[in-house]
Image: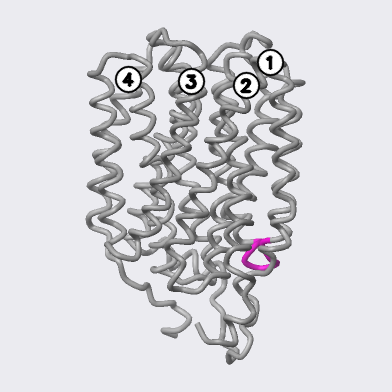
Amino acid sequence: MNDTVRRTLPPLAWVLLAAAGTFALTMGARQSMGLFLGPINTSTGLGLASISLAFAFGQLWWGLTQPFAGMVADRIGAGRVLLAGVLLVALGTALIPYMTTTAGLIFAIGVLSAGGAGMAGPSVLMAATTRLVPAEKRGLASGIVNAGGSFGQFVFAPIAGGITAAAGWVASLQTLAALTLLALPAAWVLRGHSNAPVPGAAPVKKETTREAVSRALADPSYRLLAAGFFVCGFHVAFLATHLPGVVASCGLPPEVGAWSLAVIGLFNIVGSVAMGWAVSRWRMKSLLSLVYATRAVAVLVFLLAPKTTAVMLVFAAVMGLTFLSTVPPTAGLVAKFFGSANMATLFGIVMVSHQIGGFLGAWLGGKAFEASGNYDWMWYADVVLAVGAALLHLPIREKVVAPRVAAA
């Protein structure tokens, strides 16, 4: 990166605060929703499977919005997309208590809140960070931004649990909605887009979005990366939605569920920052294989261990280390393959795969519990999928994929 370009960039600290702060607020509100599954069921009487469907649709919609939000951000700028996204998260979260049907919950949780979080989600935030920080600092920067989402979960889960205990679940949701509005100033800091002219650089022909997507989908390594991210979504959504239910099924107090979610968020801060540091030192595909293998071992040990509060919190800590630490190497591989020009779009497509897995993890968790009275089959599926994902990343080739425009 030349000196002229460096001088046009905002200060690194402001970029990281804006991106990590936005992710903390939107992800914190979103990942705390599992705490409200029981109260919503008690209030509406819709049944666990019906409510899980709304949560599952939210997982899917969060992913589906990201490539389209990425396309818009790549063309007109991240700031406007983030502004709209934060407002939608706040509106959807505030409307949840007023929804008494499955369709209403799908609209509030799945369309408004999850869609807004997708617009202000990792595809736009990671692309904006990649664009605004020097190349040599991108790995650590992506880890810090990713850790922001974990910090939000660590802070929001106890806040939500405490307000629910003191003033009820409706007041808790309204508070979460108000807190997300604190992310609005970040839209100004992260404004701009990756296809804007670079000061001091000669004009070059830009690859169109369609050409970039076609080039990515034709690459086997990109497809393997997306398949592995599907498994990550399955794991993350199942835990975020059903861990409080797992705690209850083990006969542990409800507050253990809130603290387990908080511990996942706390330790994911460590995992995300460590992974951001590691991606510039080791092969990213190998790091991803290690993360998925660790998840498989952790779930197996949890299944065999006695279900005590200590065991639950230790399990949450181990899963937290791997929870979203897949994001920096996944985003790093997309940037390495295809560059930053269409990264928001291409990483957004990978996020769709992640959230299809998330849809199944959230929905099947509720179905499995209603069918068997426990979550055992979901844990077995977690282990099998984790082993599969660890193996899927091994054939990935870490190389630049030449643009077809340049070749022509």
Give me the residue at 59% from left, 44% from top: 24
* Snapshot quadrant of residue 12: bottom right
> Which disc number belongs to residue 377?
4
Say above or below: 405 vs 95.
below
Label 2 or label 4, whichever comes before in sequence order? 2
Front tag of 2 and 4: 2
Give, as a three-letter code, the residue at label 3: Gly
Mark 2 and mark 3: Cα distance apart in space: 12 Å
**Label 1 belongs to which residue?**
166
Are circles 2 and 1 on residues that touch, CB within 8 Å? yes
Classify 10 Å Cα crowding around label 1: few (below 14), some (14-19), many (20 and above): few
Q: Which of marks 1 and 4 is in front?
A: 1
**Label 1's element?**
helix
**Residue underneath mark 3:** 257
Q: What is the three-letter code of the residue carrying label 2?
A: Gly
Residue 74 shows which numbered tag?
none
